[in-house]
Image: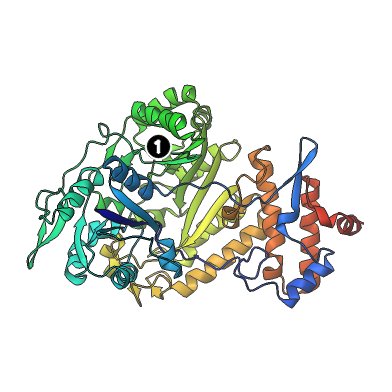
Amino acid sequence: MRALLMCGLGPSYVNLDYLRGSLFDTSGAGRDARTRAMLDRAGCADLDFADFTYTVDGGRRTLCRPRTTSVPHLTTFTLEAILQEAEQDYALMDLAGVWSGTAELPPGDFDVVLLSTTYMWSKAIFATVTDWIAERLPSVPVVCGGQYTNLKFHQVMSEFPGVTAVVRGDGERALPAVLKAVGAQRSLEEVPGAVWRDGGRIRVNPLEYMDIEAQPSPRLRGRFPIVPYESMRGCPFDCKFCSFPAASPKWRYKSAEKIKHDWLAYVAENEAQMISAMDSTFTVPPTRLRRLLEILPEAGVRWEGFSRANTVDSEALVDALLEAHCYKLHIGFEAMSDEVLKLMSKRVTAKQNRRAFHALRGSELGYVVFFMIGYPGETPELFAETRDFLVDEYSGHFMLNFFSISDETMPLWEDRERLRIEIEDPDDTHTWWSHIGMNSDDARSLQLTALDDVRERNDDAVLLLWQHQFDHWLMPERGRLENLRVEKCMERLALAPRVHRDVDTGARQIQRQLLLLRDLGVEPMAGRTALAGARS
């Protein structure tokens, strides 16, 4: 029996086409006449980011190196480990090809399709994949699992007759059992969490929760410079913009000792150089975090993870994280308005957000802070508290995400009448929406203005958007603050053609940023003569 495993991230969409028309634009449209004239006026007509270099040990190294390592997809990593442990023959197919229209069926025959819906959020997205499968593998059983079908299993089984079964909850025991049953053409009556067809009936088996402390963590053969890691299932919080707890209601977490043991095994077996903890919040519960900070320093394993702002409550905590070899934290501030945070049921305050920022900003610990624009109930006046913080106070990497309310499983729909939430098409992530505070047109305008204000008025806040295509840090031999200064110059330089309609004004901005970069030891090799003339 051979399985086709289909999993990966959902269809990506850009919150805002903020890089469109900039020098970072990789859409294939090319540079227009005005951009070419601006670069020519600045004395760098052939400017290419691939030409930027900086000094290392007396030599020059390329600054913008195409990314060579990335974090493996956690769901894929876990599912492959389950299939390999079960000695199941399978072929892997990344869903990215389905979204882009470039997907090709792997060679050979398949007896079952295993479809992960972890990064799907609408009926239309799900239908895109099932239609693709039906066209190429008619009559092959399709078994689904993951976030979307955990929540929408009744709808899926009722409206998609091509789906043979849905597996809810933990897959470590259920997935091999499903494969055995399908291969032997038996019923799925004994499979925990299975939703299956029994003649004309849809049967729902009870969930069984695995002890993730006792269960061996996923293992894959081969070299993985970065290993994704899951230290918990479920979530103890109830943020209204997140449907994850509803899909995995029981919160369970691994001990600090198991985490250390697993990480050292990945270093020994997979040559891991970093662990990426993918949990929604790795820094809870506090008792486990305290123990981790005691035992991870001696392990010597570099790692990154997600945290809540109220956990990062002092510089001493940040120092302890650095000692434990933490490389980067990802933190969702979401907003700097207490009223908006309450609407979200975020269970943190703006004061706690600010305290975390002050603890982090002067350290060498990397961090990215996420903000939202447009959450139901947020008004332009309430968003101004977030915008002003970004413009006047913030330093470091940040993202300001346009909020999409198309995910019908979000708890925020409980507030639909109170907040007057309206949406044109729940299956379209780009659809128009409105609520008591603003509509989607207002939100996009506020987002664009805020990003422009932060770029031009704050020298220390750096939008994390274009960096993902390159190895990061750009200058790993240098400190965080120096890297941030370089990234800020690159951002202002690249955005000049989009921001400045006047050729002369844009050319002066480009020259200014090239000179600042040279002062930081960064310059395009082919542009030295032009830059020398520009300074004079």
Work out whether residue 102 or residue 340 is closer to the camera in this orientation and state it. 102
Work out whether residue 8 or residue 425 is closer to the camera in this orientation and state it. 8
Q: Residue at x 82, y 69 (%)?
A: 40
Q: Quadrant of residue 390?
A: bottom right
Work out whether residue 314 or residue 462 is closer to the camera in this orientation and state it. 462
Residue labelled with disc 1: 283
Judge from the rendering whether residue 273 lies leftward or rightward of residue 96; answer left or right.
right
- The percent coordinates of residue 122 (x first, y second) are 32, 67
Q: Residue at x 58, y 55 (%)?
A: 469
Judge from the rendering whether residue 387 lies leftward or rightward of residue 124; answer left or right.
right
The amino acid beneath tag 1 is Thr
* Badge 1: residue crowd in 10 Å (few <14, some 14–19, many ≥20): many
- The percent coordinates of residue 118 (x first, y second) are 33, 56
Which element carries disc 1, helix, strand or loop?
loop
Instruction: Tell me if I can see residue 355 in this picture.
Output: no
- The C terminus - image quarter: bottom right
Q: Count how many numbered circles sit on residues in the image.
A: 1
Judge from the rendering whether residue 217 lies leftward or rightward of residue 431; answer left or right.
left
- The percent coordinates of residue 385 (x first, y second) are 51, 57
Q: Residue at x 16, y 44 (%)?
A: 208
